[in-house]
Every structure is written in structure tokens, then in C-alpha cells.
Amino acid sequence: MHLAPAGQDVERPDPRPVQARPLVAERLPEPLHWLGPEADAPEGFAISPTGEVALAILLNGSAGVPKNAWFANKNGKVAVLKIDGKRVTKVKEIEVGGLPEGVVFSPDGKYAYVGNYTTQDVSILKIDGGNVTDTGKRFALPGHPASMRGRAR
């Protein structure tokens, strides 16, 4: 992960120039600027109803890249971000299905659902306070989930 003020170039191993993209979270005093290692993230972003955790969808090289590319992967990931007042810390990454494109929390904040486009399923994550774990359960869909929407607070 590389952080930089919006609009400024970010130094990274890949020689192609990329600018940081702002993600605005209403609980944070200023926009959060995030750029993934392959510049293909985040694809989706959600803050839990409790405000303790945020999840960012990382494509992780799981879409639109040659299968023999050094960064190609079958599955994407979810970056788990702990929110503590004004401090946001990445605590872990969890592997999900191929080309994850959306994330949504259950209304009570105890579960998160990640729509995986190429694997045509939804990954189910369990939220316990600030701890996020993969339940190992997915449910299949008849089509490709391209986005997910939760209830507004």
C-alpha cells in the first residue's frame, strides 16, 4: 500500500506513473488516499455500521491481466482496516473469490458480504468487534455480481 496526498505521484516498484485516488470516509477528518501495489485497488470500500472497521476490496491481479503476469492471482482480497478515532490501521488481508467488486455489511455489522464477479459467488465474512474472519462459506449466484449496496445509516 502506498499513501500520498491526492493528485501527487506515488513511488512504487512498477515504473508506470499513477496518482493517488481519494477515498472519503465521513468519520475521518481528511480524505484517506490509498493506492494498491498493482494500481487496481480499491475496487470497493465500506465502513461497518459500528464504525470500528472498514473493508477495502483489492483485485489482487485477479482480473484483466495475463495469467502469466508476475502479479496475476486467481482470487482477490479484502483489506481489513481498524478505525480508532482518527487513526486508521490496516490489520490484515483476507482472500476472497475472483474479481471482487463490491462489499456490504449486514445491518447489525456482524457480517460482511463480498461479491466475486468471476467466481459468481458471495464470500461471507464474520465481524466480531474489530476482528474480521472468513467463515469459509460462499453462496453461488446465477450471474456475475458487479456491485453490492447496503442500507444507508
Image: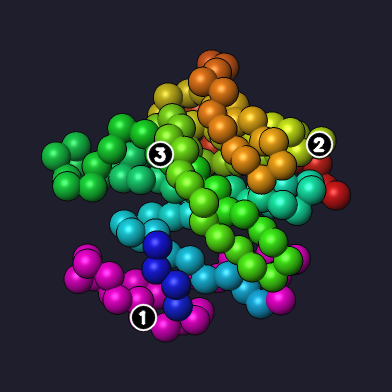
In the rendered image, the vertical position of residue 82 relative to residue 114, given as above or below: below
Q: How many marks?
A: 3
Identify the disc placed on residue 107: 2
138 drawn magenta: no
Which of the labelled discs sits on residue 117, or is there none?
none
Percent from the top left, x then y, of residue 5? 49, 81
Q: Earlier in the sequence, mark 3 or mark 1?
A: 1
Please name the residue that numbered disc 3 is placed on.
Answer: 76
Residue at the image point whose x is 58% and y is 70% from the top = 32
Query: For the residues marked 2 and 1, what is the alpha-carbon distance in whole angstroms?
Result: 38 Å
Front-most of residues 119 and 27 = 27
Q: CA distance from mark 3 to mark 2?
A: 24 Å
**Which residues, given as a range, are shown in magenta?**
5-29
Q: Amino acid type of disc 3?
A: Gly
Front residue of this view, candidates 130 and 152: 130
Q: Residue at x 31, y 57 (%)?
A: 38
Mark 3: few/some/many CA within 10 Å (<14, 14-19, 20+): many
Q: Please give the label number shown on residue 9.
A: 1
Question: Are the residues tagged 2 and 1 within 8 Å (C-beta)?
Answer: no
